Amino acid sequence: MEFDFNYYKKAADYILNIVGHEVEIGLILGSSMGSVKEIINVETIIDYKDIPNFLISTAEGHEGKLIIGEVEGKKVVLMSGRFHYYEGYDFEELSIPIRVFKLLGVNKVILTNAAGAINKSFKPGDIVLIKDHIKLNGPSPLRGKNIEEFGPRFFDVTDMYTERLRELAKTIAKKESIDVKEGVYFFATGPQFETKAEIKAMGILGADLVGMSTVTEALTAAHTNIEVLAMSLVTNMAAGIVDKKITTEEVEEIGKLSRDKLKKFISSIIEAM
Ligand code: 6GU
């Protein structure tokens, strides 16, 4: 399917009509991080299924609601529940949330995810700021006829996880005694976790983390000149890094244990943004 500007505008106009104002900051929460939404003073909640031309969330632990409100006096829109390639969407469809954000007025996004650690110095519970990514699987979400209203056909991605926002996050982490690391995120299609051989290869290629989200959103944001801050919560070590199977339970458990730390961190970042 080929999308045009009006496709996204229809979704955004529906939301703007209900909300009545623009928003500045977009937030997309990773699985088992849903409780971060509690930092919002909620104004409006809209079901994805009611938004024309939006997508429907099928992943477990992802709720399917757009929440609009305020954090530290800033207008935000939050997706509680995101869309992944493994659910069956095409890469091109995964451009929808961020392009709708853009038309709501968003100029900065915070993307969070649960990830496996490839870097042996990381441990479950660590917060890692994404400084770059490797995506060797599948096409770009920007494939297809370029929509000039969003951005140019060819675009630079050397500072897409902007140094400015990473430095800001590091300054806040230091002030609040939150330990943060930095790393390179490898995009995996899922839904299976990786083989030991794949993780070994990803490590050799320079990856510190692996996960199944975020990268399509970050690329769509970079194309349309939205500043990106992305962070992973390490929920487990990747395959073969420790001699242990990966379970969904541990991913969720670490999410629960780390949620207060994440809530405080993200609301302080929004305040400073
Ligand atoms: Cl080990 N791999 C992927 N692809 N996603 C994850 C993960 C691993 N751990 C949490 N999410």
Image: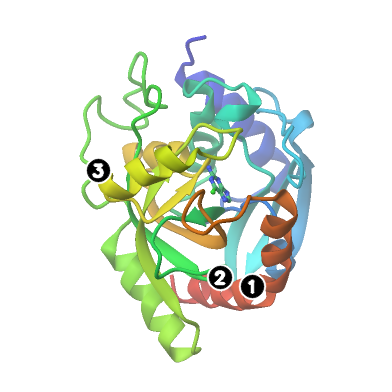
The kind of residue tagged 1 is: Lys
User: Can you tell which mark lies on residue 157?
Assistant: 3
Circle 1: element type: helix
Residue under numbered circle 1 = 263
The mark total stands at: 3
Beta carbon of the mark 1 residue lies under 8 A of ligand 1 = no
Circle 2: element type: helix
Mark 2–mark 1 Cα distance, whole angstroms, equals 5 Å
Q: Where is residue 160 in the image (x, y as percent from the top left)?
A: 30, 50
Q: Vertically, is 273 above or below 160?
A: below
Which image quarter: residue 82? top right
User: Residue, x 71% and y 49% (percent of image)?
Assistant: 248
Q: Position of residue 191 (x, y in %)?
A: 61, 33
The kind of residue tagged 3 is: Val
First in residue order: circle 1 vs circle 3: 3
The C terminus sits in image quarter? bottom left
Mark 3–mark 2 Cα distance, whole angstroms, equals 24 Å
User: Residue, x 22% and y 34% (percent of image)?
Assistant: 155
- The answer to which of 5 and 179 lies nearer the viewer is 179
The kind of residue tagged 2 is: Ile
On screen, residue 68 versus residue 196, left or right, reads right
Residue under numbered circle 2 = 266
First in residue order: circle 3 vs circle 2: 3
Dot 2 and dot 1 residues touching (CB under 8 Å) = yes
Beta carbon of the mark 3 residue lies under 8 A of ligand 1 = no
Mark 3 residue crowding within 10 angstroms, few (<14) / some (14–19) / many (20+): few
View extreme (front): residue? 243
On screen, residue 23 versus residue 36, left or right, reads left
Mark 1–mark 3 Cα distance, whole angstroms, equals 28 Å
